[in-house]
Image (cartoon, grey):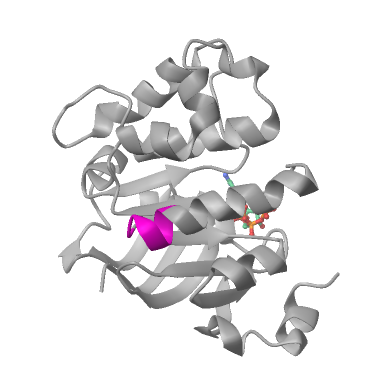
Amino acid sequence: MLMNLDRVSSFYGKTQILRDISFDLKQGSCLCVLGRNGVGKTTLMRTIMGLADRTTGSIKMLGEEVGSIPTHARSRHGIGYIPQGRQIFGKFTVRENILLGSFARPDGKTEVPDLCLELFPYLADNLERRAGLLSGGQQQQLAIARALAVNPKMLLLDEPTEGIQPNIVAEIGNKLRMLNRDHGITLILSEQHIKVARSLGDDFLMMDNGRIVASGAIDQLTDELVEEHLTV
Ligand SMILES: Nc1ncnc2c1ncn2[C@@H]1O[C@H](COP(=O)(O)OP(=O)(O)OP(=O)(O)O)[C@@H](O)[C@H]1O
């Protein structure tokens, strides 16, 4: 297993958001985290990165406890994070945005990884362009490229297709599939597009009110579950 969460609870101030979250993440797999707005998907990602106010329980990466080490040390263990809303620095160039990610690299290299150039030809051709001039889909590619600059074993992606034009959603899905299938990068993905989740995911977690209410292989994600927990 690449990662194991055991009875993880998480708090913002005195408010408990996550309750007793446990799951095992297989190396090389893609886990889709599903649920309506506000159920705790973002908090789960932030908790894994060490960005919640307080967390209890255990988070292990390759058998080693990482639940109490700082965020940058978690990056060094190979966890890359692509936050909701992408958080691109608009005044910096594409190259500068990618290099920002490389500060957490264990080997200290500051270069644009070949994988970014190979996977994202648009970015390769526009390294000196100001990131603020890029479209939403291109900025999402940049956010993924920046996370790849830490040479991660796994990526946490918080709603990577949110606010992206429908014709680009499939393209982002394809890039993620390439990272997962061809490059062996394990993914945890929160996703509102059920089609993307079904096509990319190996396993799913359905969340409600800070808890896991259903989980399993993605082919066990029935229309009834989707209806009950996702449809508004
Ligand atoms: N910084 C914070 N301080 C206090 N409460 C917070 C904070 N961030 C989120 N919450 C609360 O935690 C709960 C879970 O929010 P979270 O953002 O994790 O949900 P989500 O499933 O990712 O939803 P969305 O899809 O809208 O991002 C919500 O009730 C939210 O109001």
Image quadrant assignment for residue 182: bottom left
Asked whether residue 5 is in view, the answer is yes
Question: In the image, residue 199 lies at what x, y percent?
Answer: 60, 70
Residue 25 located left or right of residue 104: right
> Could you tell me which quadrant the C terminus lies in?
bottom right
Residue 44 located left or right of residue 67: right
Above or below: residue 155 compared with residue 221:
above
Asked whether residue 45 is in view, the answer is no
> Could you tell me which quadrant the N terminus lies in?
bottom left
Image quadrant assignment for residue 108: top left
Q: Predominant secondary structure in magenta?
A: helix
Residue 208 located left or right of residue 44: right
Q: Residue at the location (56% across, 30% down)?
A: 87
Above or below: residue 30 compared with residue 203:
above
Question: In the image, residue 10 lies at what x, y percent?
Answer: 45, 61
Name the residue furthest right. 232
Image quadrant assignment for residue 139: top right
Residue in front for this viewpoint, 202 or 116: 116
The span shown in magenta is: 179-184
Above or below: residue 213 compared with residue 200:
below
Q: Residue at the location (21% across, 49% down)?
A: 77
Q: Residue at the location (29% across, 37% down)?
A: 150
Question: In the image, residue 225 lies at what x, y percent?
Answer: 71, 85
